[in-house]
Image (spheres, rainbow, N blue to C red):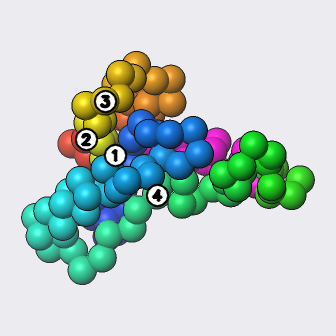
């Protein structure tokens, strides 16, 4: 109903074990992409799904600080986020770049491979 690019899911390689983007490397790129989408499609708002922001995290310490319920919700959330990459009405934004000092590239990682396969399987012109 709201059209292409209203709901976006972001595929990006995590840049550390505890935080996906500790120095805002991806965030700076994502802001530019979202601004372009808003301008291109004339949207006043864009909804964004990102794993780190949408699913309970372990707390950034060696010990998982989530409750048992939060761990269960996180597992369910990851399953649902994965489905969003394959949904025809959800636009995937792939942040392929990594800092030059990072030897593991986007295509070297399991999660981003899964997200890319799910994205590439959806039909139509909504595929990113």
Q: Residue at x 11, y 70 (%)?
A: 39
Residue 60: % across, % down: 66, 51
- Which numbered disc, 3 or 1, marks the residue that appears first in the sequence? 1
Is residue 79 on the magenta stretch?
yes
Residue at x 54% of width, y 60% of height: 53
- Bin the neighbour count of mark 2 within 10 Å (Cα to Cα): few under 14, some 14-19, many 20 and up: some
Residue 108 visible within the image: yes
Range of magenta residues: 73-85
- Percent of width and height locating residue 70: 80, 57
- Up/down of 27 relative to 45, above or below: above
**Above-or-below relation of 100 to 45:** above
Disc 1 crowd, CA 10 A, few/some/many (<14, 14-19, 20+):
many
The Cα atoms of the two marked residues, 3 and 4, are separated by 27 Å
Q: Element at badge 1? A: strand
- Magenta span main SS: helix
Look at mark 2 in the image and give the residue it sits on: 128
Q: Secondary structure at mark 4?
A: strand
In the picture, residue 43 is in which quadrant? bottom left
Q: Please tell me which of labels 1 and 4 falls first in the chain.
A: 4
Q: Which residue is mark 1?
A: 92
The reply, left or right, for residue 86 in relation to residue 54 is: left
- How far apart marks 1 and 4 lie (CA) works out to 10 Å
- Find disc 4 in the rendering and name its residue: 49
Callout in the foreground (2, 3): 3
- Residue 41 position (above or below residue 77): below
- In this picture, is 104 found above or below 18? above
State the mark number for residue 101: 3
């Amino acid at each position: 109903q709201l059209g292409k690019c209203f709901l976006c899911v972001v595929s990006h390689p995590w840049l550390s074990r505890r935080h996906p983007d500790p120095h805002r490397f991806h965030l700076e790129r994502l802001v530019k992409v979202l601004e372009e989408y808003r301008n291109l499609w004339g949207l006043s708002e864009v909804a964004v799904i990102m794993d780190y922001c949408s699913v309970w995290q372990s707390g950034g310490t060696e010990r998982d600080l989530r409750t048992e319920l939060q761990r269960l919700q996180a597992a369910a959330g990851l399953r649902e986020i994965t489905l969003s990459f394959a949904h025809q009405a959800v636009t995937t934004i792939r942040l392929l770049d990594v800092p030059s000092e990072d030897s593991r590239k986007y295509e070297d990682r399991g999660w981003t491979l899964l997200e890319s396969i799910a994205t590439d399987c959806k039909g139509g012109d909504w595929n990113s």
